Amino acid sequence: MWTYVKWEIRRLRRQPRFWASLLGVAVIGGLFAYGYREMHGKTLAVSSVGAGIGNGFLVPVLALSLSSSILLPFLVALFAGESLSGERQSGTWATLLAQGVNPWSLFWAKSLVAWAYAIGVTLLLTASSLFGGWVIFGLHASALPSGVMASAPAFWRLLVISAAYAASGQMVVATFSLVVGAFCKTSLSALMISMGTLIVLAMLGDLPVWGAVRRLFFPSYFSRITDALTFPTNWTPLNHGLLVYAIYCLGFLALILWFQPFRD
Amino acid sequence: MAVAVEVRNLRKTYGSKWALDGVSFTVPRGAMLGLVGPNGAGKSTLLRTLLGLVRPTEGMVLYNGDSLWPDPWPLMPQVGGFVDSPRFFPYLSAKENLTLLADLSGTPVNRVMEVLQYVHLTDEADRRVGGYSHGMRQRLGIAAALMKRPGLLILDEPQDGLDPARLEEMRRLLREVRREFGCTIIMSSHAIADVERLCDRIAVFSQGRIRYVGPASQLGAGLVEDVIWDITPVDRALDLLQALGIRARLLDDGRIVAPWDRGWDLAEVNQALVMKGVRIATVMRQAESLESRLLAYLEGEHVDIR
């Protein structure tokens, strides 16, 4: 299995767009810090920003909340979806199978690398936005809009929870995109289907009538940023979200096990 | 002679279309079978099925008595080859591509340079495959297939798109592979003359079915002469010839050809044509080629002699 993972990583490393995506995420993290500085103190929908909390800890929370539904899923869907469908499109998938390479080992290796990429870009965005926040505002304790005084360790804990939750969400996106990619013959169709589905789900989730359904089936920890600023942390929505994510992942993998779409 | 490959009543459907419709044949160990037929006849689908890339709807494929389907993976070390044209990672060198394939398929990596040398690609081993010519990729595809030292080699149009010099090189390579590796080879080709020269068995494909399978010599047995007319007006002449019971057909160059089976008198036919106002510029007899015999098979003019 590790031989497969090693080659998958090596293959990914040779692609300029892989490095471009990492560079892009790092730059965007810094831009979030700059944007936060520009916005804070103004009357905005995001209360913590509008309330003028000049604290570098809040920059990654904002960056993750705004990127979790569009930017990160786009990148993750691009790489995870392409990893299978792109090989099918280019014909290298047939070369590998004709060579006697086990398709299941390939699939699991690609899954591991896709999940690692999903976690990696989330952590990179967290790190770059935290760095930008630290440079501009510094990292320190602050009073929250609720009046609660949050210490620096409490902020660190919030940051770890936020990043872990965002990474879990992106792993679901990666799994979904892998499954879509396994059924598609071109990387473009895989990207269109996975991104299209995610956008439709995000739009449906924003409709008031879907609110309850969304909270039940499409939990978005960052859709209500005040939840993330709850001190002490409210574990119930977090656990619910993680449980739903896990069910989704298992469902997607069950689809693969059932259909085994590795051969035409 | 022991049977290396046995295909029994193989069928494959895509929606309502039959890509393979009850294909059956056997290939003796060490033999070379050439698949010929028009585009869309089912050759590539058959090769894909034999390579474990396409799951058949019905039927069986046996390699040395073991069934390839439903799980082809355990038998794949015995089989090598490519379908369409061989595809590799363009941003990796030939050496890296083969090392990747060897590493993932559990083949000893030290065979990489060995097979590259065999297909005369040692000097280009460190060059990215993206910059390779078509012929070099074909050779690299054969190198990849040979790395496993397979008992069965499956090649889809290995001579496709090669210039005459490379074509001769490929013919030589295929003969060498067969001689030195002793493997059974199944290849498809549009170059019927090549198949006739390289293969000892031929399978003629049309509309997902095998019209003929057997020794090339048997297919060519009893070849007759063709009569070729350069004649105007062509449509009228064609109608008249067919009215006389002659199986005439139009060639791409506008001439008319008919097999001369001595059941009719050429002089009388020419006279009848002239009497009906047809102008004959030239008329000539030539020996029927294997190619024209195959075309006749594909057009259903001959009965199946399987």
Image (spheres, rainbow, N blue to C red):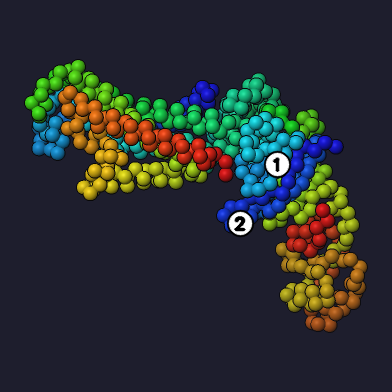
- The residue wearing badge 1 is B61
Using residue A98 as the reference point, say whether residue B278 is left or right of it.
Answer: right
**Rendered location of residue B251, percent (x, y):** 74, 64
**Rendered location of residue B106, percent (x, y):** 62, 24
The subunit letter for the residue under badge 1 reads B
Label 2 element class: strand
Which quadrant of the figure contains the N terminus of chain B?
Answer: top right
- The residue wearing badge 2 is B17
**For residue B298, above or below residue A262:** below
Question: Which residue is more in the foreground, B204 or B281?
Answer: B204
Taking the view exactly as shown, the residue that stands out farthest to the top is: A153
Identify the image quadrant of residue B144.
Answer: top right
Q: Residue at x 66, y 48 (%)?
A: B58
Question: Which residue is more in the foreground, B132 or B101?
Answer: B101
Q: Can residue A177 be seen from the camera position used here? A: yes
Identify the image quadrant of residue A166.
Answer: top left
For marks 1 and 2 on the same chain, the one whose residue lies earlier in the sequence: 2
**For residue B267, above or below residue B298:** below
The amino acid type, in three-letter code, at marker 2 is Lys
